[in-house]
Image (cartoon, grey):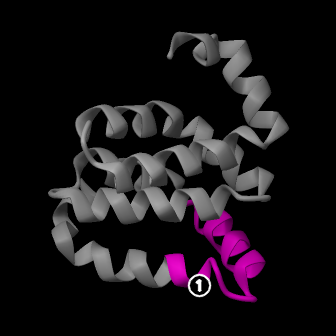
């Protein structure tokens, strides 16, 4: 509901956050994201936000937030990000940019040993 209320107004903040996650301060931004516990909101943004843009930029932020940051990767996994990313790909079957963003995020998540263990234990890694 929070993200749905923002609507397409969430695009610019997500783009800015994504840019910061590429900066020399990326580690600090990742730590801040973990402390702020925004993982569920980012996953929710892919599912309930109106239009493609919010979902696309949330997907990109998720990938960078998880890259080499085990705590964010695990928190995102616990928020259901793997299913949300797969659903996003299914909802946009002809959207190459969306597929690249989602598979990149999944790749970064899969590099995390704790996420691998969680998915294996839940049986999710064999379902899709």
Residue 89 x, y percent position in the rendering: 35, 38
As drawn, is 19 to the left or to the right of 74? left
Name the one closer to the observer, 108 or 17.
Answer: 108
Q: Which residue is drawn at 29% across and 75% down?
A: 11
Residue 100 x, y percent position in the rendering: 46, 51
Q: What stretch is highlighted in magenta?
A: 18-37
Q: In this view, does 117 lie above or below 31?
A: above
Q: What element carries label 1?
A: helix
Q: Residue at x 34, y 40 (%)?
A: 88
Q: Is residue 46 above or below residue 28?
A: above
Residue 5 x, y percent position in the rendering: 17, 64
Q: Residue at x 32, y 82 (%)?
A: 12
As drawn, is 1 to the left or to the right of 15? left
Mark 1 packing: few (<14 Cα in 10 Å), some, or many (20+)? Answer: some
Name the one closer to the observer, 124 or 104.
Answer: 104
Q: Label 1 belongs to which residue?
A: 20
Report the magenta stretch's main SS. Answer: helix
Residue 57 x, y percent position in the rendering: 38, 65
Residue found farthest to the right: 113
């Amino acid at each position: 509901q929070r993200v749905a209320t923002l609507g397409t107004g969430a695009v610019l903040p997500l783009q800015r956050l994504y840019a910061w996650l590429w900066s020399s301060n990326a580690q600090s931004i990742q730590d801040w994201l973990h402390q702020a516990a925004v993982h569920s909101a980012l996953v929710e943004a892919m599912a309930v936000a109106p239009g493609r843009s919010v979902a696309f930029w949330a997907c990109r932020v998720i990938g960078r937030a998880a890259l080499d940051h085990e705590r964010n990767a695990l928190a995102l996994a616990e928020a259901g990000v793997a299913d949300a990313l797969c659903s996003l790909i299914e909802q946009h079957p002809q959207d190459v940019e969306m597929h690249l963003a989602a598979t990149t995020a999944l790749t970064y998540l899969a590099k995390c040993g704790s996420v691998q263990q969680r998915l294996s234990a839940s049986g999710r890694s064999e379902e899709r």
